[in-house]
Amino acid sequence: MWHLARPVTQLPTGPSWAYEIKVDGHRTVLWRTEDGVRLQSRTGRDVTALWMDLAVAAMRLPPGVILDGEAVVTSQPTTAACTSASPRRSPARCPAPAARGSSPTSIRRRM
């Protein structure tokens, strides 16, 4: 189920290939169920409480939707130049607004 990126010496070419920016986040699967939303880390840990803003936003999705992506906190809503999920890992060590949940968060889809 999990497909991890790996380094290569040359990018593949052809019409079936697409590329995305690298963001520093948490690999996350989001399930929208009949009863609510659940987010799970790559290791199988339930991380819904850490990403409650994503869970609340996902309640607008129809039941049955599954998203596999990278959960990230961005410094500005219009840029991906500075992204991180580190404050969500240990908010006590990070006094930045992102640790308090005031920075925009998103789930970036995996290709």
Image (spheres, rainbow, N blue to C red):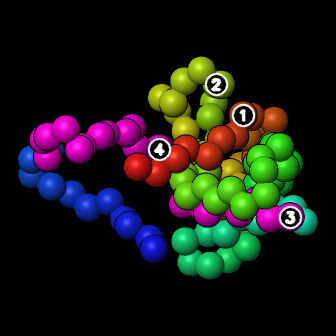
Place of residue 41 in the rendered image (x, y in percent of width and height, measured from the top left): 61, 69
Residue 67 located within the stretch drawn in magenta:
no
**Marks 1 & 2, CB-CB < 8 Å contact:** yes
Question: Which disc number belongs to residue 34?
Answer: 3
Residue labelled with disc 1: 104
Q: Residue at x 46, y 51 (%)?
A: 110
In this rendering, the answer to whether 74 lies above or below 42 is: above
Place of residue 20 in the rendered image (x, y in percent of width and height, measured from the top left): 37, 39
Between disc 4 and disc 2, whose residue precedes?
Answer: 4
Q: Residues within 10 Å of mark 2 (few under 14, many from 20)?
A: few
Amino acid at dot 2:
Gln
Q: Nearer the viewer, residue 65 or 108?
A: 65
**Marks 4 & 2, CB-CB < 8 Å contact:** no
Amino acid at dot 3:
Glu
**Marks 3 & 4, CB-CB < 8 Å contact:** no
Residues in magenta? 12-34
Residue labelled with disc 2: 76
